[in-house]
Image (tube, helix red, strand yellow):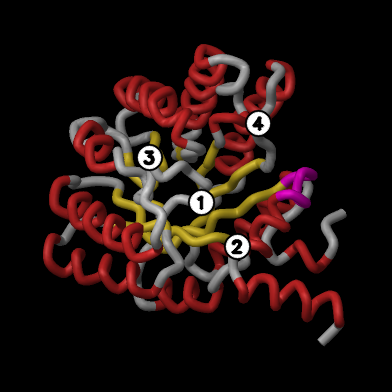
């Protein structure tokens, strides 16, 4: 069981409980991006097992007619075992999801996996146009070229700031530099992409910039935020008519994910402390 202190950030340990949360999101005009917790497998068996669950999850989302999609981590489905394992598992997840008309996002991890991830997404998008998307990290210095590469690929892009501790040789270190890069890349997406722009940010400044770019370019876009983070803002944006999708993690590997959320934002740490103290 997930303790109440962590349940703010993780939907459930089971598929059925998670889909109930997705249904609740839909009732508040939020879509859901469902992610099975698990990463950095170094053997094929658990990678294949999680890929199997994603295939079943696509069917469950469709059978309940829920507004939800999938999001998969490369290291969860085999990239640390071998690029061929990751690519094969990603392709079969997308194929199973496409049969149910369910969209699949591919998360991005540290910079050493970027090329392999982009290769797999691009190849799969050619076979399943508009059925896949990929997260791109604004803090990486290579991102400008990666976006140019993706401009002609029938895949969506989720722009995030980037959460991995990367060396300064490949990534911007200061908050201001990352913010500047995010705004620059976001404008490129709104200007050059006519499909699938996802603003993966909780930063009010970036969300305001996105709405200004929408007014200027008219490019369809969606906002993506984590479960448990600025949920009032998520609902408010949805009420204003924006497409908002909540990233919904689930599964029994919740502890590492929960502590990561607590460490990364002061507000999350204060929430956890209040829950412990019962205040």
Label 3 packing within 10 angstroms: few (<14), some (14-19), many (20+): few
The mark nearer the N terminus, 4 or 3, is 4
Q: Secondary structure at mark 2?
A: helix
Q: Is residue 106 above or below residue 25?
A: above
The mark nearer the N terminus, 1 or 4, is 4
Measured from the top left, where is residue 182 in percent x and y? 30, 57
Instruction: Give the labeled residue for mark 3.
Output: 169
Could one spot residue 255 in this view of the protein? yes
Find out whether the residues at labels 1 and 4 contact each other: C-beta distance under 8 Å.
no
Mark 2 or 3: in front is 3
Find out whether the residues at labels 1 and 3 contact each other: C-beta distance under 8 Å.
no
Instruction: Give the labeled residue for mark 2.
Output: 264
Over which residues does the magenta segment extend? 251-256
In the figure, is residue 226 to the left or right of 184? right
Label 1 and label 3: CA atoms lie apart by 16 Å
Measured from the top left, where is residue 43 in percent x and y? 71, 18
Please tell me which residue is depicted at 55% across the width and 51% down the height of the picture.
66
Label 4 and label 3: CA atoms lie apart by 24 Å
The mark nearer the N terminus, 2 or 3, is 3
Label 2 and label 3: CA atoms lie apart by 23 Å
Residue at the top extreme? Answer: 84
Instruction: Give the labeled residue for mark 4.
Output: 40
Q: Is residue 231 above or below residue 21?
A: below
The mark nearer the N terminus, 1 or 3, is 1
């Amino acid at each position: 069981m997930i303790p109440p202190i962590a349940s703010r950030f993780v939907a459930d340990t089971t598929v059925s409980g998670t889909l109930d949360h997705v249904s609740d999101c839909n009732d508040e005009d939020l879509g859901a991006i469902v992610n099975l917790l698990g990463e950095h497998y170094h053997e094929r068996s658990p990678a294949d097992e999680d890929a199997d669950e994603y295939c079943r999850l696509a069917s469950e989302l469709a059978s309940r007619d829920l507004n939800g999609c999938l999001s998969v981590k490369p290291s969860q489905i085999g990239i640390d075992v071998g690029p061929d394992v990751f690519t094969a598992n990603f392709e079969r997840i997308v194929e199973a999801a496409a049969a149910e008309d369910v969209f699949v996002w591919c998360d991005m991890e540290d910079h050493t996996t970027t090329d392999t991830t982009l290769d797999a997404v691009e190849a799969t998008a050619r076979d399943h146009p508009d059925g896949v998307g990929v997260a791109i990290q604004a803090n990486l210095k290579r991102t400008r070229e990666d976006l140019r590469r993706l401009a002609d690929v029938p895949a969506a892009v989720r722009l995030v700031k980037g959460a991995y501790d990367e060396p300064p040789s490949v990534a911007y270190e200061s908050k201001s530099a990352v913010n500047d890069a995010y705004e620059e890349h976001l404008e490129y997406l709104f200007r050059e992409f006519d499909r699938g722009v996802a603003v993966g940010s909780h930063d009010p400044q970036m969300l305001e910039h996105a709405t200004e770019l929408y007014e200027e370019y008219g490019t369809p876009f969606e906002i993506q935020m984590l479960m448990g983070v600025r949920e009032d803002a998520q609902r408010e944006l949805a009420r204003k008519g924006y497409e908002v999708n909540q990233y919904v993690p689930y599964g029994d590997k919740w502890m590492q994910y929960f502590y990561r959320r607590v460490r990364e934002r002061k507000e999350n740490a204060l929430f956890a402390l209040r829950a412990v103290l019962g205040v």
